[in-house]
Amino acid sequence: MPRSKVLSGRSEPVYRYIVQQIFSGRLAQGERINEMQIAEACGTSRTPVHQALKQLELDGIVSIVPNKGVEVVTLTEESVHQIGELQLLFGWITAKLAMHNGSAAEFLALQKLAQECRADMRSDDLETRIGANTRFYMEMAAIGKNSVMMPFLRKLFLQAGLVLAERYRDGDACEKQSQMHFEIINALLEQDMGKFRDSILPQLVDLYGIEDFYAQIQNGQL
Amino acid sequence: MKGKQGFNASQPVYEYLKNLILSGEMKPGDRIAEQKLADVLHISRTPIKEAINQLANDGLVRIYPQRYSEVMLFSEDDVRHMGEMRIALEMMSAKLALYHGSMADFNKLAKLADACEEAQRSGDVFRQIETDAEFHLSFTKCTKNPLLYKFQRELCLRIRLIQVNSTFSDEENQRLVEYHRQLVKYLKERNLASIYTLIEEHFFQFYKLDQEYPPNFFHLFRV
């Protein structure tokens, strides 16, 4: 899972634990987070739990309401569309940069990763599936060699994870996503963004329900 | 972190430090003296650490865990990458602003373009940098996308840090003002080709990216 850069050694594992709980579905959207329970489960005091929650709030995964507590955010239809819009736009840009700045060797290494991810995306554990998908796209983006972009992508994928925690319950959807990884690599190897556009974008549009937005793009209105 | 009264002590520290950094008073590479700050402000180190964490999240400060933290120092590569990020966010904002933004939103944008021009005319460099950032933020606000807005805010903070520690010619300052004006004009006209060309040309020049990428490289969904 992508690492946060500001968490201490003690709060980082707590952060990862909470994300795991959320992405695996054990903590639902809108559910209260019991800090003491987390502290017990992680074998730490409440301080690292609190630090981890503060970072998760900055990352948009939980919301801290003063005097009330902490809860997992609830995604509205609108916020799912908003995440989808960014996945579409960043998906394009990262692929373009990877295609320009990457070598065949790097694309082939990415193919090996896609094979590993495919196995993980067949796992029974939701969080493993989500993690594998994220790992692939972050590695692809890294080939674009823009280090400034990576933390932004990490944040986007955390938000996307909330959406995928619903979508990936369907094993077929997950299998499709894995197939997309291989199609992306083909597009990269052939230096063909048209291939990327035709095989990947419609899938993303479908996943996030942003048909209207994409139709406007295809019509040349945007 | 809340004190006993529920007051968030780190927020004012955050604002104070952010100001020092974005005004150029603290320079890239300057160490942040946590204990000294704690003494001067008469608070514990905890809210200071939290404020520094927030600044690190903004990309304005680099933390060396268990050691110290310093004002972010950007390499040439970092600057170039930020330029790529700038174009990317601007292109994304354009597409989403055309979809989610209203004429009323674009009129607000025009007012900010005016404010930046006024600052440039009066030679107020700090105000010019500030209003330029406000323009980009307001532009991204037209997209109604909170995550994209967050990204733009973080990027703007880092770019302000670079700008306040650089010197620009009159010509460069004027080009900046002209960019705002033209962007608003084309947005209102929904002149797509002109919007995307303007964005790319402006930032290619600014960040010297024309040596790295061909024209139209950053035009989204254009094969």
Image (cartoon, coloured by chain):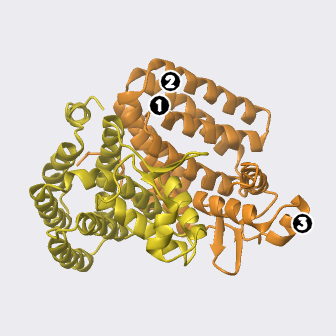
Chain colours: A yellow, B orange
- For disc 2, the marked residue is B106
- Choose the circle earlier in sequence order: 3 or 2: 3
Pointers 2 and 1 in contact (CB under 8 A)? Answer: yes
Identify which residue, B183 or A132, lies in the foreground.
A132
- For disc 3, the marked residue is B39
Residue B107, image quadrant = top right
Residue B178, image quadrant = top right
Residue B197 sits above or below residue A195 on the image:
above
Residue A110 sits above or below residue B197 on the image:
below
- Choose the circle earlier in sequence order: 3 or 1: 3
Residue A119 vs residue B11: left or right? left
Does label 1 lie on the same chain as label 2? yes
Q: Amino acid at mark 1?
A: Cys
- For disc 1, the marked residue is B142
- Choose the circle earlier in sequence order: 2 or 1: 2
Horizontal and vertical percent for residue A75? 36, 42
User: Marks 3 and 2: which is nearer the front?
Assistant: 3
Does label 2 lie on the same chain as label 3? yes
Does label 1 lie on the same chain as label 3? yes
Identify which residue, B78 or B43, lies in the foreground.
B43
Q: Secondary structure at mark 2?
A: helix
Q: In the image, what residue occupies the spot 41% across and 32% down?
A: B97
Q: CA distance from mark 3 to mark 1?
A: 43 Å
Q: Chain of mark 2?
A: B
